Amino acid sequence: MDDLQEHAVPGPLGEAPGLTQWQRVGSIFSAPSRTFTDIQRGHRSWWLPFVLMIAASYLFFGAITLRIGWDQVAENAIHFNPKAEQRMAQATPERRATSMKITRYSMEGGFAASPLLMLGFLAVMSLGLWGTMNFVFGGKATYGSIFTVWMYAALPGTIKTLLGIVVIYAGMAPESFNLNNFAPTSVGAFLDPLSTNAALYTLASRLDFTSIWSLVLLGMGAATVSGLKRSSGYMAVFGWWILFLVIGVGWAAVMG
C-alpha cells in the first residue's frame, strides 16, 4: 500500500511532487498529459491500472459464466462463422463434440489466464513501440516508461468491459451474445456477422471507440516519455495499428 502514496512525496528542490497511482488513473480520463509527464519524470509504477483492468475482466468473466454459459459462447462463436459452422455440420457427432469442447475450454481458459496473457502482450508490443520511438523517430524513451504508458493508456478498455457486463445483465439473449462484439462501442457491434462480408465485419469491429481512444492516449504518452512531438507518437502508434489492421482484414478476407 505504500506504493500508492510514495509519489506524493516532494522531490528535489524545484521539482514538482509526483502523482499517486490513483491520481494518475484519474488524470488519464481528465488530463492525460499529467499522467504521462509524471511517468516521464521516472514514476513508473503500473500495478494499479493492471489490477483495475483484471478486476473488470473477471467481473465480465463471471457475468458470462452466470448469464450466458461458456457452452453457449462456444456455440455462438461457431454459428457466427459460416465456414466453421459448415465444417461442424459435416463432422461426425464424436468429432463435433470434441471440437465444441476444445472451442469452449480454449475461450474460457483464455479469460481465466487473462493476467498472464495481458502482461505478455503488453511486454512484446511495448518492445516494438520502444524501438520505433527511439530508432525510427530518434526519441529517448526507456522500455519501462513505454510499458507504463501502455498500461495507463489501456484503461479506456475497462469502459467497454463494464458496458459488456451491463448488456449481459440488461437481458441479452444468450444465443445472440458475440464475444467479438460484446458491447456497443464499435461499428461492427451494429452489423450482422452472418450477412456482412467477413473482411468488412473485421474492419468494422476494429473501428472501436474505446480502442481508438486508447491509441490516441498511447501516441500522446509515447511521445511524452520519448521527448518528441505528439505527431511522432501518433505516427508510430497508428502506423503499427494500420499494419495489424491490414493483416487482420486480409486474413478475414482469405478465410471468410
Image (cartoon, grey):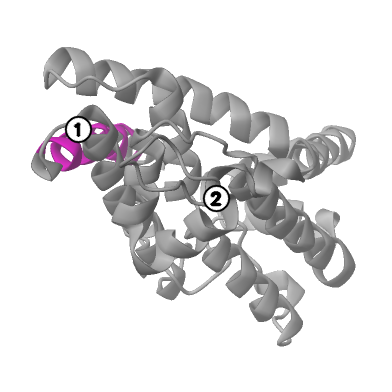
Q: Nearer the viewer, residue 24 or 129?
A: 24
| Element at label 2 | helix
Query: What label sits on residue 150 in the rendered view?
Result: none
Query: What label sits on residue 8 in the rendered view?
Result: 2
- x and y, in percent, of residue 70 in the image: 82, 55
Q: Which residues are magenta?
A: 232-249
Q: Residue at x 54, y 44 (%)?
A: 7
Q: Nearer the viewer, residue 93 or 27?
A: 27
Name the outermost residue toward the top: 135
Name the outermost residue toward the front: 13
Q: Nearer the viewer, residue 47 or 81?
A: 47
| Distance between mark 2 and mark 1 Cα atoms | 32 Å
Give the left or right position of residue 10, taking residue 219 as reference. right
Q: Quadrant of the C terminus?
A: top left
In the picture shown, does residue 31 fall above or below 168? above
Q: Residue at x 32, y 51 (%)?
A: 217
Label 1 neighbour load within 10 Å: few <14, some 14-19, many 20+:
many
